[in-house]
Amino acid sequence: MTNSEQIFIRDSKIAFDRKHRATLRHNISKYDQAVARGRQRYSHFQQAREKASFLKGCAVARLPELLLEFEKNITARGARVLWARDAADATLFIENILKENDARLLVKSKSMISEEIGLNEHAAEWGAEAVETDLGEFIVQVAGQKPYHILTPAMHKSKEDVASLFHEKFGTSAEATPEQITRFVRKRLREKFVTADVGITGANFLVADVGGVGLTENEGNGLMTVSFPKIHIVIAGLERVIPSVADLPFFFQHLAAHGTGQAISVYNSLLLGPRTAAETDGPEQMYVILLDNGRSQLLAEQEESAALKCIRCGACLNACPIYQNVGGYTYAATYTGPIGSVITPFYNGFREFGHLSFACTVCGRCSEVCPVKIPLHELLLLNRHRKITAEETSFGWKAALKTFGFLSRKRSRLDLAGGRWKNRLARIAGHPLGKNREMPRFAPLSFSKQWKNKIA
């Protein structure tokens, strides 16, 4: 059993924490209600999903071509594109940029990919301070934690939890309201924005035909992260590219509808490069780091490559009965829930994270709610098959399966022993799915013998 699998089994006990479950259930229910209202604005909801799935599918099929087109167009306007094979490459690029510019303070807008490469931890090693500016990200950073949810980093915390945390860390009122906490954070972050050396963002979309970076957000912190510092660094996965700027308004709305239920997020930006000589605002330098980190391996798979269509709305997490019970930290991975269970083994290795594919009831809810129609539950079954066939199975397990196969091929073989002997054997062997499960009791007579006796 790998370390990550042990963590999953150990931490899944949080499902029995009633306060945790109540907080998670409450917060997810708010999103569910908002998304349900958002769906009602569509006159052809399923057709919108079909369109999104088709457009992203075309982008994945043309990924190398579109990425080169994006690089050509954004480079022509003064940005620099850096290709990172893995997290080590990406962090080395960022370290060099900081050293070359003697940068010590970084402000970051919400970016799961920066979590993927461990940017905050590396920044501390370089003697730099990385400050999260999304409110949810700021809360979990203050708590010394990682994002709990792809879209809502502090999904696991109630307003009382946050008030208590800020009282402990900053001396604010223990009964502070969400509005008071928000004002406090806003004032504190303003000071960081105006003194920061570098702003770091992710990218919701990379637009190939114009060479632009699409950002969508609700707090305005993304725009401030870009506008104040002299250097802007974008970190984006290869899969974020879309073909045309004509598709960007549709994707901004589609992402908002499935993520938060809004008609569209509050701030939607298309960043086309560093500021020009005719502009007074914006960064003097812009870098775009395109991260592979296992995505090429996923792209090479005929069926699993569909996972690269994901637009990171978080809908599958909110729908998943496993996530709703064990929460985000149990996965011990950057990306959690159904989509995380599909892609993490490709990014971080099947040996260490292949068990995540078994954290699934195969109910199909994740596939039903996915805005780009990724068949997530089917991909999880493919991952299970990959992990099982790649591993060496013990002699005892193989022998048990062969014995079961031999006996189950004929009813007469199954009826050789009566219920009393079968129950004894079951007690000795234990449940094949684990010690915490209980084997059902066998009846004294098999169904076929009971049927024959009835007829007789």
Image (cartoon, rainbow, N blue to C red):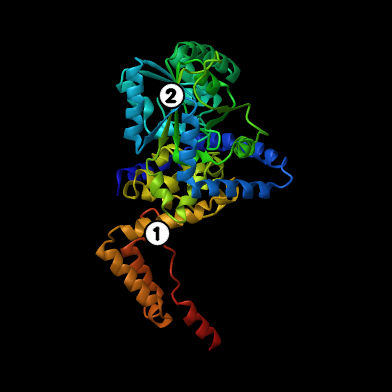
Q: Residue under circle 2?
A: 141
Q: Viewer-proximal residue, 138 or 234?
A: 234
Q: Is residue 304 left or right of residue 279?
A: left
| As drawn, 36 above or below 402 | above
Q: What secondary structure is found at the residue carrying circle 1?
A: helix
Q: What secondary structure is found at the residue carrying circle 2?
A: helix
Q: Residues within 10 Å of mark 1 (few under 14, many from 20)?
A: few
Quadrant for residue 97, please give it: top left
Query: How many angstroms separate mark 2 from mark 1 (CA)?
Result: 37 Å
Q: Residues within 10 Å of mark 2 (few under 14, many from 20)?
A: some
**Residue 221 in picture, x, y percent from top left:** 54, 21
Q: Tell me the kind of residue under disc 1.
A: His
Q: Work out whether residue 83 can be spotted.
A: yes
Task: Give the residue drawn at x 44%, y 48%.
Answer: 342
* Dot label at residue 15: none
Q: Viewer-proximal residue, 30 or 115?
A: 115
| As drawn, 230 above or below 156 | above
Task: Give the residue drawn at x 43%, y 70%.
Answer: 442
* Dot label at residue 385: 1
**Upstream in sequence: badge 2 or badge 1:** 2
Q: Is residue 277 left or right of residue 48?
A: left
**Residue 429 in picture, x, y percent from top left:** 32, 64
**Residue 225 in picture, x, y percent from top left:** 50, 20
Q: Viewer-proximal residue, 323 or 196?
A: 196
**Residue 285 in picture, x, y percent from top left:** 44, 20
Q: Tell me the kind of residue under disc 2.
A: Gln
Q: Work out whether residue 149 can be spotted.
A: no
Task: Give the residue drawn at x 54%, y 39%.
Answer: 314
Q: Check the image and name the residue furthest to the left.
A: 395
Quadrant for residue 417, please give it: bottom left
| As drawn, 200 above or below 211 | above
